[in-house]
Every structure is written in C-alpha cells, then in structure tokens.
Image (cartoon, rainbow, N blue to C red):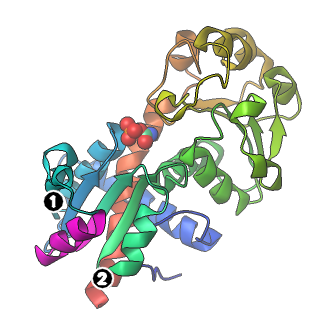
Amino acid sequence: MKWTKKDLIGLENLTSDEILLILDTAQSFISVLNRDIKKVPTLRGITIANLFFEPSTRTKASFELAEKRLSADTLSITVSASSVVKGETLLDTVKNLKSLLCDIVVIRHSYAGAPVLLAEALENMGIVNAGDGMHEHPTQALLDMLTMKHIFGEIKGLNVLIVGDIKHSRVARSNIWGLSKFKCNVGVCAPSSLLPREIDRLAKSFTSLDEAISSAKWDVVMALRIQKERQEDGLFPSLREYHRVYGINVNRLKQLPKKTIIMHPGPVNRGVELSPEVADSSRAVILNQVTNGVAVRMAVLYLISSVLRKG
Ligand code: CP
C-alpha cells in the first residue's frame, strides 16, 4: 500500500488501507519517541507552517513537536498578530507562505471547507486539516483509533458509543467516518437538539444515555466536549442538568462492561461531560490519546512529504 495524497482533509475520503498505513507508520514513530534522543532527520529540508485560526493546546503542541521530532523547519503563525487582522484573505496568506518556500500548511479554521479550498488552489503544497468548523478533525480520530488499536488489538468490529455534542463536533464526524470503514458498531447519544439531522444514516442514535449504555457491550465510550463557542442558546437547560442526564459518572461507569474504556478528545469540562472521578480513573485513556497524537501527526507529515518530494 502506497500513500499518494498531498493533503489530509478528512477520513471520509480515505480507505481503510490508507488509515491502517497511517496507523502502522505512527506505530513505527512511537519507537522513535521512546528513545532518549527523540529525533530523526526524516524531514530535513521540509518547511511546515502551522496556521491556527482557533484556539488549541493539544493539536498545535503535538503538530509542533511532531515537526521538530522529524527535523523539519517550522513556523507557527499567531493569527491575531498577522496580516489577517488587516484584511488579508486566507488564500493570499497561504500563497505568501508558499512564496516563502513552505511545503506544508497545517490549518485549523472555523470555516468548514477551508482546508479543501486551499488544497485545491495550491499545487505542490501539502495541506493538513487540524480541524475545520463542524466538518472534520482527521488527526484526532486517527489518534483515537491508534489508542483503541493499542488496547483492543484491532479496530475492526469495536462497539463505540459517542456521547455529547454530536451536532457541533468535527471529532464525532471524523470518528464515525473512520470507524465505519472498519465495520464498527457506532452509537451516538445526545439530547435531540445536539444530534444532527442526518445522523441516523451514519450511526444508531439515542437520546437516553442509560438506554444507550444498556443497549450493547460497549468497548469504548467517547465523551465529547460541550462546545460553548458554537452553541446557540437553549439547546439544553444548563450544564448542571446536562451532567445529570448525559454526564459519565461513577454510577454509569459501573453499568458499563469492565473492559470499557473512557475517551475524550479534550479539553474536558470537568463535571459536565465527565465527573472528575471518571476523568481521573484508570478506565480513562485521555492522556494516552494525547501521547499518541505526536506519532500520528509525525506519520501524516512523513507520508505527505514523501509525495511532495517526488513532485
Ligand atoms: N482535541 C483537540 O483538538 O484539542 P485542542 O483544541 O486543544 O487542540
């Protein structure tokens, strides 16, 4: 299996073989990250710009680390201190980065479709989607799948329940697309106001968490952040009420099989999606997900660079 794409826009358009190639490549980089000197010369000569139009801790830090571990030249543009605030368009900004001989742009943007717009407009430049609006967050789902693979041995056939703000979640969409390629049983659970209309085409949906929990032997329960920045008012009564009805607490954890792991892409709203006891329990693999993010992003940048180098 050979990687042939210069961009990573989402998991919807990847095959299961392409996803496995990224995960296998990430696995080989984990052995690099476990060495005393966590650096290889693989991307020497490649220049990568990180362009984050929305806040980020995990994704931005792990892309930056992935780039440094691979010996790429990197720059991170602070959008609020860039010429974007003077009115420069996204396309002009990235064209200027290309003129500065950047090879790859890692972009997070509130506009769903920003990465694909750039990918189509710019030949010989790699575009990596680090989260676009409510569309996709492919590297998050890839690191989630790598974490599942570590724990369960394979992804095929896993039972995965995604709980929370499905409507606004690019993490949910990328996971649903990715997991469905491996014939996983994916369920989603949220108040009906936080379930997108088209969801029943993609996953079995529940509005009662207790019903969802008892409906299958879930391997994974993935809680999603309530995205206060994308909420219209009145989608649920209050955060306290949300936690009572949809929060994963110790009682609900006890209803789940002993093998069930708890995942969350972060940042966690403690006491909302997860009680602090659950977030800090041995069943939660949230920090393992973060660790795996560096290897997954190294894999994506390595594969894309190999296509760009061939021209
Ligand atoms: N999971 C995730 O995307 O976190 P950040 O917003 O901190 O990057």
Residue at image coords 70%, 63%: 181
**Magenta segment boundaries in residue numbering:** 90-105
Between residue 89 and residue 10, name the one nearer to us.
Answer: 89
Label 1 amino acid?
A: Thr
Q: Identify the residue position indicated by label 2 in the image.
A: 308
Q: Please, what secondary structure does the residue beneath circle 1 have?
A: strand
Task: Identify whether 298 is placed above or below 288.
Answer: below
Residue at image coords 54%, 50%: 141
Label 2 amino acid?
A: Leu
Q: Going from the N terminus, do you reach mark 2 or mark 1 first?
A: 1
Q: Identify the residue position indicated by label 1 in the image.
A: 74
Question: Where is residue 171 drawn, in percent x and y?
Answer: 55, 46
Q: Is residue 88 visible?
A: yes
Task: Identify whether 58 is placed above or below 110.
Answer: above
Mark 1 and mark 2 in contact (Cβ < 8 Å)?
Answer: no
Magenta span: helix, strand or loop, mainly?
A: helix
Task: Identify whether 276 is placed above or below 230.
Answer: above
Residue at image coords 32%, 80%: 122
